[in-house]
Image (cartoon, rainbow, N blue to C red):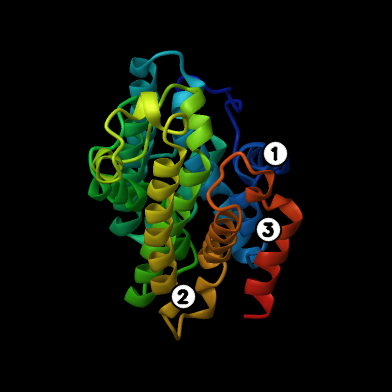
Amino acid sequence: MSEPPGGKSPGPEAAITDDANLDDLIADLRRQDPDRLYIALFAPPALRERLIGLHAFNLEVAATRERVSEPMLGQIRLQWWRDALDEMRRGDEPRRHPVVRSLAAWMPAAGEAAFDLALELVNARERDLEDAPFATVKDLGAYAEATSSNLVRLGLLAAGVTETAAHDAAQAAGRAYALAGLLRAVPFHGAQGRIMLPGDLLGRHGIADARQSIGRRDPGKLKSVLTELAEMAERDLMSARAVRSLPKAARAPLLIRPLARLYLKRLRRARFDLSEPRIDPGNAAKIAALWRARFLA
């Protein structure tokens, strides 16, 4: 099988080195994950294609829920990616899929750590197939680390960066970005009938029945929940920014930091009113933030 269930086939001889396939991955990221496309485009040429392929891999697994009609198909899709990674780890011929071929160009040389991080990322995405909220803030943090932080750390490995300090910064920055994304996505999840905010956090702020009260009868309580999560993200961001003497090669993968900072600033400026249009900074502001961090920091 050259394509996971729920996706389009790239053709039997597809490879990331084909310009057409690379253009397709860029187009998919531009439509569905422009943040990570911009990060890849700000990377040095030698790293850029690796990050495009890596971020396309993340998109493939992160969009599983939206690409399948029932949870069982989502499980099958995620298993396809586990099998592809396991085959790559064993040294088998990589599957004829442009994202798999892209990963196969560098992951074996990056060692076992790269495969462990990627498999943790895939496994964590099983959580997306459920409607139930996270039970605790700790559960949410673990999910953020397994998905968002692991992706940033994989970017570091793609750049050849193994220093512990850089990976510590990536762990914190990934959590901050994931929490900022969760805050901004509350209306999106609500439209799907999902509440992803942690149950213990909702309870601390007096929201006993999230589906009935969140954002409707108790907008003030909702804002207090969002404020606490934002404070957690800001602490993570401070930790990530406090790491000094990072290798130059770590700059591009860690460009997630200025984006997280930008989103959190916009949320605070809007006083956590998620209906406020200015919480979306727009592409120009994001590109400007990335440019300053990449070339002026």
Give the image location of residue 48, x and y in percent: 62, 59
- Mark 1 burial class by Cα count in 10 Å: few <14, some 14-19, many 20+: some
- Sequence-wise, the earlier of marks 2 and 1 is 1
Frontmost of labels 2 and 1 is 2
Instruction: Work out whether residue 113 or residue 87 is closer to the camera in this orientation and state it.
Output: 113
State the residue at coordinates (42%, 39%).
93
Give the image location of residue 157, x and y in percent: 42, 63
Query: Which amino acid is tagged 1?
Result: Ala
The residue indicated by pointer 1 is 27
Residue 241: which numbered mark, if any? 2
Query: Could you say whether the residue bearing mark 1 is in a helix, strand or loop?
Result: helix
The residue indicated by pointer 3 is 286
Q: Quadrant of the C terminus?
A: bottom right
- In this rendering, the answer to whether 178 lies above or below 133 is below
Q: Quadrant of residue 56?
A: top right
Q: CA distance from mark 2 to mark 1?
A: 31 Å
